[in-house]
Image (cartoon, rainbow, N blue to C red):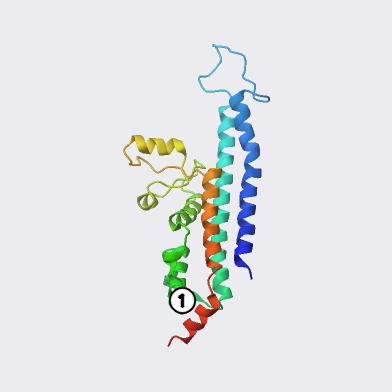
Amino acid sequence: MDVDFFLKERTAFIKHYYDEAIAPFAETMQKVEDGLPPFLPPPFDPETMSEEPAFLEEWLRAQTGLQVVGQTCVSMLSESLKIFFVTHEKNAGLDFEKLWGKNIFSKGFIHGYRTCFAKMGVDWSKCPANFSILEQVVLARNASQHATSITSTRADHNVAVLSKHPSPLFVSSHEMNLLASRGGSWMMPPAVHVTRDALHQAVAEVEKLAEWMSTINFRALVKALKATP
């Protein structure tokens, strides 16, 4: 099986889905900002007008929709990465948990699979993929899939994550500017904010990993592993 090919089929769909799914939300936000139909600014009336911008609720709802699409795509990318590793494990005819115990995945599937493949002889120092970004894909997925408050759809980065990744990939430019103004210290966890550029950057790292692993002779590694006393 050409695992690299099928992984890229998934990543291509994720990028396409993102562009198609955000379109109506982005259009609504732009129309509100430009004052275009059906979001025409109401006539000025100092007696009844609020200080709140017109159609703020509609703009915020569209912004939330845009971010939910981004978080969905990151979740899809995380699951694609996981099934990519699982497929390589199955193709090798191995069961890593049986070989090295269930605790091998106690620190997450990326760490677990890197450890398992290293035990087979894979030299990860030669891999061109940025594992910091790959880890952030999984962590952003976890943050977006495990809500902590019924009062908000906002997904925040975990404090522990920020200690390991102080400048997260999935964060808004506004919150990054706030970080700079505070001397590099987060006052509160930033939201998981997925942009098109950040999503494409993450996809590129997943594809780098897939391309590199496609060059590995797993049959030889498995044969050597089974021959080990």
* The N terminus sits in image quarter: bottom right
Q: Please rate how many residues cluster around mark 1, counting C-alpha atoms within 10 Å: few if below 14, some from 14 to 19, many from 20.
A: some
Task: Please say if 40 is above or below 95.
Answer: above
Left or right of 58 in this view: 51: left
Residue shown at the point (64%, 25%) measured from the top left: 39
Depth check, front residue: 38 or 178: 178
Residue placed farthest to the left in the image? 183
Residue shown at the point (44%, 85%) measured from the top left: 228
Q: Position of residue 47 (x, y in %)?
A: 54, 11
Residue shown at the point (56%, 15%) measured from the top left: 48
Q: How many numbered marks are there?
A: 1
Q: Where is residue 53 in the image (x, y as percent from the top left)?
A: 54, 23
* The C terminus sits in image quarter: bottom left
Depth check, front residue: 69 or 205: 205
Task: Please say if 38 is above or below 61.
Answer: above
Left or right of 191 in this view: 1: right
Q: Position of residue 106 (x, y in %)?
A: 42, 66
Depth check, front residue: 12 or 174: 12
Q: Which amino acid does label 1 sit on?
A: Met
**What is the quadrant of residue 87 in the picture?**
bottom right
Residue shown at the point (43%, 75%) measured from the top left: 119
**What is the quadrant of residue 118 in the picture?**
bottom left
Residue placed farthest to the right in the image? 37
Task: Please say if 211 is above or below 62.
Answer: below
User: Regarding mark 1 in the picture, which secondary structure is present there?
Assistant: helix
Q: Position of residue 153 (x, y in %)?
A: 52, 42
Which residue is labeled 1 in the image?
Answer: 120
